[in-house]
Image (cartoon, helix red, strand yellow):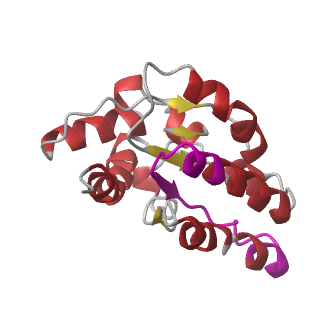
């Protein structure tokens, strides 16, 4: 699970982080999986791209699936969507080259950005999912970012209930990819 603070488990116990909860959810679905938390708080797509090969090469074996959750910090910092696209494209391309199926957990630009920004940013994830045939959760924070009951006091990061809601949506995608013929 290569991502930013949303994967790393910012503000929650490690056993409450998205990768840990996903591992538990997959186990409940009958899939024995070890989900490695490669989330780094504050990471951008450029950072994820830079550490992808090192992260994959450091694993005991080639993973059966890679989840990619990067881009939120790019948008929050107003980084050029063309660079975000280029970095995510390189990440997913490298997964394909290595024969690793993927799941993209997409992001949307904050609506306080100008329209041109989010019109450039928001299509990145569905277009890359289509291009590479990876599974897509279109907006990882769907139903969470607008519900303060599911957020930490910072109003940005999910609390354990928010992480559970996000996991409930992503687990079927991971399950489908792991049970491929």
Vertical position of residue 85 compared to residue 178: above or below: below
Q: Picture quarter containing residue 84?
A: bottom right
Horizontal and vertical percent position of residue 49? 72, 41
Residue in the foreground of this view, choosing between 132 and 7: 132
Does residue 10 show up?
A: no
Vertical position of residue 96 compared to residue 66: above or below: below
Looking at the rendering, in which quadrant would you find the C terminus? bottom left
Residue 84 relative to residue 91: left or right: right
Residue at coordinates 60% horizontally, 61% vertically from top-left?
107
Residue in the foreground of this view, choosing between 109 and 128: 128
Number of marks? 0
Residue at coordinates 62% horizontally, 31% vertically from top-left?
40
Horizontal and vertical percent position of residue 43? 70, 37
Q: Picture quarter containing residue 106?
A: bottom right
Horizontal and vertical percent position of residue 48? 69, 39
Residue 53 relative to residue 100: left or right: right
Q: Picture quarter containing residue 61?
A: top left
What are the residue bounds of the magenta stretch?
93-118
155 in the magenta segment: no
Horizontal and vertical percent position of residue 113? 80, 70
Vertical position of residue 63 compared to residue 170: above or below: above
Residue in the foreground of this view, choosing between 149 and 52: 52
Residue at coordinates 64% horizontally, 53% vertically from top-left?
93
Residue in the foreground of this view, choosing between 15 and 22: 22
Residue at coordinates 34% horizontally, 26% vertically from top-left?
15
């Amino acid at each position: 699970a290569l991502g930013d603070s949303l994967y790393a488990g910012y503000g929650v116990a490690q056993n409450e982080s998205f990768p840990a909860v996903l591992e538990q959810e997959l186990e409940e679905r009958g899939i024995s999986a070890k989900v490695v938390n490669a989330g780094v708080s504050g990471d951008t797509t450029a950072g994820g791209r830079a550490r992808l090969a090192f992260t994959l090469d450091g694993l005991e074996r080639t993973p059966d699936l890679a989840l990619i959750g990067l881009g939120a910090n790019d948008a929050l910092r107003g980084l050029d969507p063309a660079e975000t696209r280029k970095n995510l494209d390189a990440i997913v391309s490298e997964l394909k080259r290595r024969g690793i199926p993927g799941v993209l957990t997409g992001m949307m630009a904050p609506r306080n950005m100008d329209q041109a920004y989010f019109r450039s940013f928001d299509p990145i994830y569905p277009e890359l999912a289509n291009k590479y045939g990876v599974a897509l959760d279109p907006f990882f924070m769907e139903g969470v970012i607008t519900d303060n009951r599911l957020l930490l006091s910072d109003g940005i990061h999910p609390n354990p209930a928010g992480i559970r809601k996000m996991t409930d949506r992503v687990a079927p995608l991971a399950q489908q990819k792991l049970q491929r013929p």
